[in-house]
Image (spheres, grey):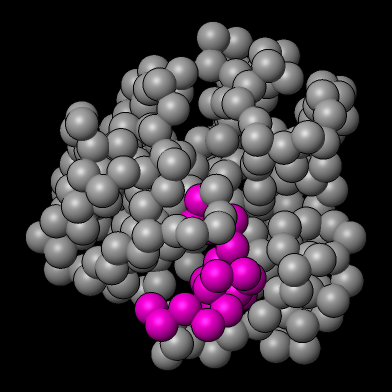
Amino acid sequence: MFKHVIVKTPGKSYVNGLTTSDLGTPNYEQLLEQHQAYVDALKTCGVSVTHLPASEEFPDSTFVEDTAVLAAEFAVITNPGADSRNGEIKEIETTLKEFYKEFYTKLHYIKAPGTLDGGDILQVEDHFYIGISDRTNEEGARQLKEIVESEGYKGTIVPLKEFFHLKTGIAYLGNNTIVAAGEFVDHPDFEQYEKIIVSKEEEYAANCIRVNDYVIIPKGYEETKRKINEAGYETIELEMSEFQKQDGGLSCLSLRF
C-alpha cells in the first residue's frame, strides 16, 4: 500500500523541455488540467499528496520520478542522465528529508560518472530491475544494484534495445502480474511473471501505475483497459496527450511510497 505521493506542477517552461516525439508543442492550459486530474486520481486512490510548486528553470521537473528511487526502508537520490535536469535533485532531496526520519533509515546517492533516471527502475516486491538506456549508464546501474543489494533486495540490470526508459514498456500490478509491451513481452528476465500483453498500437498504455486499489492508465487504449479489467483490476483513465508530447507517461509524474 502506498501512503504518500510527491508531484510537481509543470511550469510554463515545460513546453521547451526535452523530447524525442514529433507530436507538437504542448498546450499549457490543457497540461495543467491534465496534471490536476492526475492529482485528483491519486487522491481517489487514498494517498496523501505532497504538491511541489513549478520550477521554471527546470522545464522537465514535473517528471519527478526520475530524481529518486524509493523503497520501504531507504531512498536513493539519482543523477539524471540529461545534464539540464541535474539541478532538480536538490528540491527532491530536501522534500524527502522531511519524510526521512519517519520512513527511511538511509539516504543513498548515485554519483558521477554514474547517471540514472528513476524511469529506468521497476520494483517488483523485493526485486529491482534496472534499465540501461540513453539516460541511465552502466556505472549508474551498477551503483544502484550495489545499493539495493546492500539493503537486502535483489537487483537485475536490463540493457534496453527499443524503449526510452525501462518503464516505458513495463509495469508491475502486484500479484506476480506485469503489463508488458515490445521487447519485454518475451524477455527472459521477466518470464516468471503473469503478463498482460500490450499491442504495438497501444504501447503507450504499458506505462500505467498501480496505486492501492486502482490501476491508473492513459485514456484511449481500450484493448489494454479491457485486459487489465479482466485480470481483476479497477481502472482510472486519464487524458495524457500533453505529457506524451514530451515523452512523459503516468509513472513519470510522481514518486510513490
Instruction: Tell me, yes or no, if residue 197 can be seen here.
Output: yes
What residue sits 72% from the left and 63% below the top?
Answer: 203
- Please tell me in which quadrant of the rendered image residue 194 appears: bottom right
The C terminus is located in which quarter? bottom left
Magenta-tinted stretch: 165-189
Q: Is residue 98 visible?
A: no
The answer to which of 152 and 163 lies nearer the viewer is 163
The percent coordinates of residue 28 (x first, y second) are 82, 22
Q: Would residue 141 appear left or right of 240 to someone viewing this image?
A: left
Q: Residue at x 54, y 26 (%)?
A: 61
As displayed, is residue 19 above or below residue 173? above
Above/below status of 57 relative to 167: above
For the image, the number of numbered tags is 0
Q: Quadrant of residue 254?
A: top right
- Residue drawn 23% across and 71% down? 154
Identify the residue at image location x=30%, y=37%. 115
Judge left or right: residue 54 versus residue 34.
Answer: left
**Residue 15 located within the stretch drawn in magenta:** no
Query: Is residue 51 shown above or below 207?
Result: above
Q: Is residue 185 magenta?
A: yes
Check the image and name the residue furthest to the left.
Answer: 150
Indicate the position of residue 140 as horizontal and vertical percent values.
Answer: 25, 44
104 or 233, which lies in front?
A: 233
Residue 226 in the image: state x and y as whole percent.
83, 80
Please, which residue is most extreme toward the front here?
A: 161
> Eyeballing the image, is 175 above or below 121?
below
